[in-house]
Image (cartoon, helix red, strand yellow):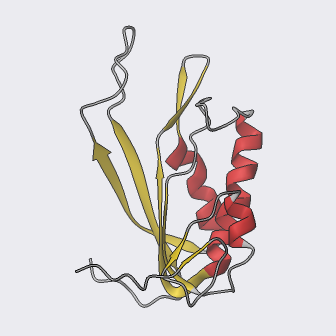
Amino acid sequence: MFNTDINISEKFDLNKHIILYNGSCLDLLKQIPNKSIQLIVTSPPYNIGKEYEKKLDIDAYIKQQAEVIKESVRVLSDTGSICWQVGNYVNKGAIIPLDAILYPIFHNLNLVMRNRIVWHFEHGLHCSKIFSGRYETIIWFTKKNQRQIAL
C-alpha cells in the first residue's frame, strides 16, 4: 500500500517528506538551516551547452560550482556526506575531467574525499575521432571532523 498522507512542498520545510523545487538550487539551499542535511546527491550541469544550461567560460563555471558547493557544505551535517556526480567538460577538443577541477573546492572547504566512484554505461553519443566517453565520476566527501570511516 502507498502512503497517501505524503506532504509535498514547493519550498524547504523540515516537516515535509518531499520537496519539489522548480528554480535555482542556490535559492533552495539558502532556505535550508545550517548542518541540517545528512546526504546530498547531485549531478550538476557539466557546462557542455545542453538545452537546460547556458555554456559558460570554464572559470565562470568553476566559480558558479564553488558557490553551490559552499552552500551545500554549509547545510551538510557534521556526519553527512556529499556525492557529486560529474562528467567531462570539452573545450576546443580538449577534455577536462570536472571531478579533477572541482576537487580543490571541496578540499579547501575542509572536506575529505572518501571515494571516487566511476559509473560506466553503454549508451550515449558515438564519437568518430576519439574514444566515446562512457563514464561519469561520483566524488564522495565528508567533513574532516567526522569520525574515521572504516574502509
Give the x, y percent position of residue 52: 62, 38
Give the x, y percent position of residue 147: 42, 91
Locate the C terminus by quadrant.
bottom left
The residue that appears at 44% across and 58% down in the rendered structure is 139
Q: Quadrant of residue 45?
A: top right
Q: Residue furthest front?
A: 4
28 is higher (above) or lower (below) than 143:
above
140 is higher (above) or lower (below) than 118:
below
Give the x, y percent position of residue 124: 34, 28
In the foreground, 18 or 129: 18
Give the x, y percent position of residue 132: 34, 22
Judged left or right of residue 102, residue 112 is left
5 is higher (above) or lower (below) than 59:
below
The residue that appears at 38% across and 81% down in the rendered structure is 4
The residue that appears at 70% across and 34% down in the rendered structure is 54
Q: Residue furthest top?
A: 128
Judged left or right of residue 101, residue 2 is left
Locate the N terminus by quadrant.
bottom left
Judged left or right of residue 107, residue 80 is left
Q: Quadrant of residue 23?
A: bottom right
